[in-house]
Amino acid sequence: MRVVVFALVLLFCAYGEQTSGAKLEFEVASVKSSVFGPGADGLCRGGPGTGDPTRFTCKYVDLKRIIVWAFGLPPFQVAAPDWTDNQRLDIQAVLPLGATKEQFEAMLQNLLIDRFHLGFHRERRDVTRYELLVAEGGPKLKEAQAGDAAPLPSKAPNPVKKMRDFRLDKDGYPILTTRGFSNVNGRARFYEPQGPIESLLPLLNMIMDEPVVDSTGLKGNYEIEMHWGQAPLFGHVRAQQTQANGGLSPTGAVTAPDVGPGGPSIQQALRDQLGLKLQRKKGPMETLIIDRIDRVPTEN
């Protein structure tokens, strides 16, 4: 039985330009072009918020992902050359004890500037995106009580975690007692014991494979629990829309099938379980434009 668990991280953090002061750099850093071989799992480990906060290591990771992490943005807000998706790297870096996520991101940015001669600028572009809205009939959300949950965990570079123990309900959906997302054999569940509506956005961005913005106007903290059919993992709704001959009504409402391999679609789950809906439209979004970047890093 295949099990995939994601501890969702909030990827929508605004990037702050580095302020005056000492240049933030790793204490030691090695960056090399990578080839597929033993241990080439395409993952990064360590860094702030993990069990190994002073070491950051990557094996066979694409350059685009390093850029995304360095600026704390979702992939669709970074316009980089297509080849960066396939340019693979091995990275070993040492951080000072107590480095924050923001400092870690600045170190990654400086690493890209120093070793790859990164150049970039920002501009607002019109993009196709989804708006998360309150559905007809109103929201179906339970207000969270103060103290129901611990504060959100620190953001870690790698959002993928291995599940060591899990239970399933009578319908085969994973049971979650802490915040996160689990997918077991095409049956998925998301649970947030206490958080704002924005806590749904990383999940929806991952599934829709396009930007999702919160337009609900809901400002409280909620206990959010939702289950749905999930297969494949990424671009799930986009694939369904293709099968549905375009997938959008003239109003921009999502019209993918309501029942997937493991149960209701993400759209039906949003409507029936949370009283929310997705609507597709065009709108402006700040985008990080990569003007130049080398294919091969300079010598360590």
Image (cartoon, rainbow, N blue to C red):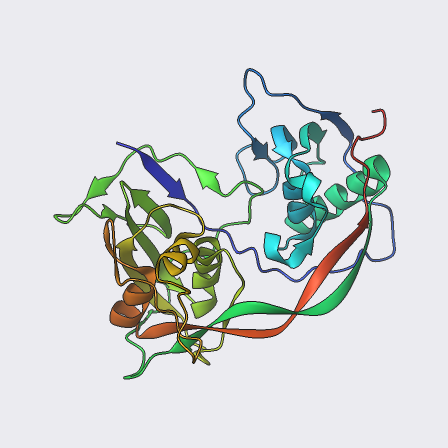
Q: Is residue 138 above or below residue 143?
A: below
In the displayed image of the protein, which residue is found farthest to the bottom?
A: 137
Q: Is residue 297 above or below residue 170?
A: above
In the displayed image of the protein, which residue is found farthest to the top?
A: 38
**In screen coordinates, is 152 left or right of 110?**
left
- The image shows residue 220 at horizontal and vertical percentages of 42, 75
- Find residue 76 and report its image quarter: bottom right
| Nearer-the-camera pick, 52 or 185 | 185
Kindly identify the residue that appears in the image at 36 percent across and 57 percent down: 243
| Nearer-the-camera pick, 261 or 107 | 261
**In screen coordinates, is 92 left or right of 114?**
left
Q: Is residue 8 above or below residue 142?
A: above
- The image shows residue 296 at horizontal and vertical percentages of 79, 30
Residue 163 visible in the current orientation: yes
Residue 74 visible in the current orientation: no
- The image shows residue 91 at horizontal and vertical percentages of 69, 28
Count every numbered label the image shows and give the total. Answer: 0
Kindly identify the residue that appears in the image at 30 percent across and 61 percent down: 225
Quadrant that contains the N terminus: top left
Quadrant that contains the C terminus: top right
Kindly identify the residue that appears in the image at 74 percent across and 60 percent down: 16
Kindly identify the residue that appears in the image at 79 percent across and 38 percent down: 111
| Nearer-the-camera pick, 15 or 2 | 2
**In screen coordinates, is 106 left or right of 236?**
right
| Nearer-the-camera pick, 97 or 300 | 300
